[in-house]
Image (cartoon, rainbow, N blue to C red):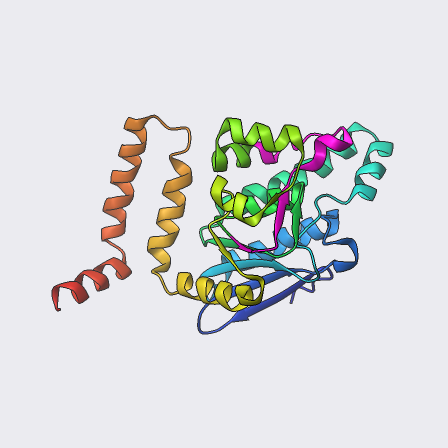
Amino acid sequence: MTVFEHLEIAIDEPEGVNWIRLDRPDRRNALSSELVAELKDALGLAAADERVRVVALAANGPDFCAGADLLEIQASVEEGVMASLADAASLGELFLLVRKLEKPVVALVEGRALAGGCGLATSCDLVLAADSARFGYPEVKLGFVPAMVMAILRRNVGEKRAFELIASGDPIDAARALELGLVNRVWPDDEFESEAADYVAELASRSATAVALSKRLLYQTDGQSFEGAIGAGAEVNALARLTEDCQAGIRRFLER
C-alpha cells in the first residue's frame, strides 16, 4: 500500500470519486519535489483503479496551491542547470499525466491558486472555484517565467488574454477567471463544498467509456488539421458504438 506524506487520498464509493487533497498547508501547498512525485503516484493509482471514475483534486488549508516551492528552486539553482532542468521536467511530467489520464480530473479551488499552483489547476480537465478564490501567474514580478504553464494557459484563454495574465502578474478573482474561461463553475464560499461534491458525483455517473473516449479525442485533435480531426472523430465514433455502455444506452432509448 502506497503511503503519502503530503497528500490525503480517499475514494467515495459507489460514486467512484477519487479525492486527492494537497496536504502541505503550512507551506500553502507549495509544489515541492516530494509533493509532485506523490501527485504522479496518486494519479497512476487512480488510472489503474477500476473503482475510480473521476479524480477530484482539492487542498487542505486556506489556499489551493502557492506554486513551486521557492526554497527548492533556490537550492536547484545552487546545484546547477541540470538540477534545475530535472526539477522543471518533473513538474512538466505531472501536467502531461493529468492530460493523458483517461479519467477526468477536476480541480476544486478555494483560496489562492498562484503560479505553478494555477498551472496545476488549469491543467485539469475542469476547474470549480469558490467565489473567494484567486488565480494568477505572478512569476514576472520575481523575474521568473511561467514557462510550462503557457502551453496550458493559451489553450484555455487564447493568446492575448494569456499574455496579459503572464505579463502583468496580477491575480484575478473567480468571477473574472470564469469570464476568461479558466474556470467552469463558481459557487459562493458557503455552498462550494456541497455544490462541488455534487458536481463531481454527477460527472462520475456518466458513462466511463464515453467520457474517456471524449477526453482522448478532445486532446488528440489539438494541433491536427481539420481533415485529420474529422478522421480521428470518425474512428472514435465507430469505436464508441461497440462499447457496452453505448449498446446499453441505445437499447434503453429504443425501449422507451
Q: Is residue 212 left or right of residue 22?
A: left
Q: Is residue 22 left or right of residue 225?
A: right
- Front residue (pair 215, 118): 118
Check the image and report above or below for 186 versus 236.
below
| Residue plotted at (78% across, 34% down) | 83
Q: Position of residue 217 (x, y in %)?
A: 36, 42
| Residue plotted at (30% across, 27% down) | 226
Magenta stretch: give its range: 128-150
Q: Position of residue 57 (x, y in %)?
A: 57, 57
Q: Residue furthest left?
A: 255
Check the image and report above or below for 238 versus 152.
below
Q: Is residue 39 left or right of residue 247?
A: right
Residue 71 in the magenta stretch? The answer is no
Residue 133 in the magenta stretch? The answer is yes
| Residue plotted at (40% across, 44% down) | 216
The image shows a total of numbered marks equal to 0
- Front residue (pair 158, 245): 158
Q: Position of residue 178 (x, y in %)?
A: 49, 46
Q: Residue furthest right?
A: 78
| Residue plotted at (77% across, 32% down) | 142
- Front residue (pair 235, 109): 109
Position of the N terminus, as image quadrant, is bottom right
Check the image and report above or below for 144 versus 183.
above
Which quarter of the picture shows residue 253?
A: bottom left
Position of the C terminus, as image quadrant, is bottom left
Q: Position of residue 149 (x, y in %)?
A: 60, 36
- Front residue (pair 17, 162): 162
Q: Is residue 131 left or right of residue 85?
A: left
